[in-house]
Image (tube, rainbow, N blue to C red):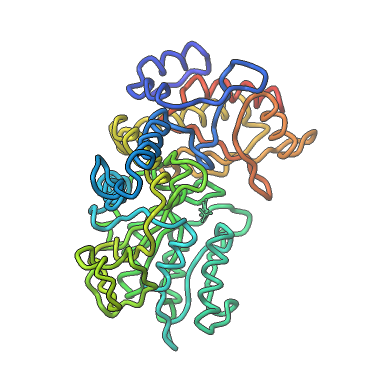
Amino acid sequence: MAFEDSLAFAQSLDKEDPLAHMRQAFHIPRIKYSTEEEVYFCGNSLGLQPKLTSEYLNAELSKWQKLGVKGHFDCEFPWMPYHEFLADESAKLVGAHPSEVVCMNSLTANLHFMMVSFYRPSSKRYKILLEDHAFPSDHYAVESQVRFHGYDPSEAMVLLKPRDGEECLHLEDILSTIDQHADELALIMLPGVQYYTGQVFDMQAITDAAQHHDITVGFDLAHAAGNIEMQLHDWGVDFAAWCTYKYLNSGPGSVAGCFVHEKHHDNPELPRFAGWWGHDKNSRFEMENEFIPIQSAEGWQLSNPPILSLAAIRASLDTIKEAGGIAALRNKSKQLTAYLRFLLHNRLAAHIDIITPDDGLSGCQLSICVNSDNKTGKQVFAAIEAAGVTCDWRAPNVIRVAPVPLYNSYEDCIRFVDILEASL
Ligand SMILES: *Cc1c(COP(=O)(O)O)cnc(C)c1O
């Protein structure tokens, strides 16, 4: 489509947007001391609150008030199987069977629990492939697992570095590194979408390469879940984990998601850190000492989960379902982000660089580096925040902006670029 740089054109795109009404399903923050809505481009960090959320949370509070412990059984959405009500919609987001996903714990905790089962180093194969600049929590998790098994991180962590002067990784470099270290790698752990650059990784090609060499592969989907389409089951990915407070709008610190491929569900050889919520549902309350894992991703659960957080996830999943699911979101997202990219190019090409790759290798986020003699990136970031934009700054050098298809508009893109232009 031929874009135009004008408010009228942006508004015409909003008029034709089949998801435009979804903005009304969210609470949009207002600019301080004003009734005007912010340009909220921060769904990659904390998604906004769906209007369904308080209704669903209140329903659980009310059940607790009226039923006490009986809320586990005799009511609509009983707490005992509550996590099961999230499985179908969570599975659709990542391209899984419902038995392969479960909402539990937090993201970093899930990465650890997954590595307990799927990082099984031997004297010959003990290395983990990850990015040189992985999200710090992921780096710490991998490093501490490596140490826990008695290996030296400087030797056991194979770090993927971008080419000199570049920010993003080339698929061919990832694949050749896998080939080069094939005999020593026990695990590959990479993001689905890179948090700093917004680059989408070719999870299918990476998984194919891993399987070719019999290497286990897991993905951190923090920036992928609710952002791009995936087919974890068909690709044969071994495990994945994601948080639900970014593109999944389930509230700060909400319970995370986890995927374990079906091929691992009935493998008694897999080590795991067990808890009673992972035990066979039929005999869980017989309180015996022999652990019998549920033969699904649920078998990795430890504890009975925080229902209030799961209720918020259910509200968000129902909101996404109402919008038509991840395919509908991605469809709008491609055009919305392309429009923002067009505006930035059209007006600000001399002052900024967008490090997020084009050609289908991005989700909704664009990562912007400021390229100006009079102002640093951080000063520009402070100025746009003061003018009513919420987005985020990531050291060392990037302003991350994420127009999300559920609640952002084409008009938001124009307002953002107006403010950024004025701030430069
Ligand atoms: C957001 C994010 C995290 C956050 O981890 P928590 O355990 O949810 O605090 C971890 N890794 C990546 C790649 C992220 O983007």
267 vs 363, left or right, is left
6 vs 211, left or right, is right
Q: Position of residue 355 (x, y in %)?
A: 57, 44
Q: Quadrant of residue 418?
A: top right
Q: Is residue 341 above or below residue 393?
A: above
Q: Residue at image x 46%, y 33%? A: 49
Q: Is residue 2 visible?
A: yes
Q: Position of residue 120 (x, y in %)?
A: 40, 79
Q: Position of residue 371 (x, y in %)?
A: 70, 38
Q: Residue at image x 43%, y 46%? A: 244
Q: Is residue 110 above or below residue 248?
A: below
Q: Is residue 405 visible?
A: no
Q: Residue at image x 32%, y 45%? A: 93
Q: Residue furthest bottom?
A: 123
Where is the N terminus found, in terms of image quarters? top left
Q: Is residue 327 above or below residue 186?
A: above
Q: Quadrant of residue 119?
A: bottom left
How many labels were placed on the picture? 0
Q: Residue at image x 71%, y 26%? A: 423
Q: Position of residue 282 (x, y in %)?
A: 19, 64
Q: Residue furthest right?
A: 374
Where is the C terminus found, in terms of image quarters? top right
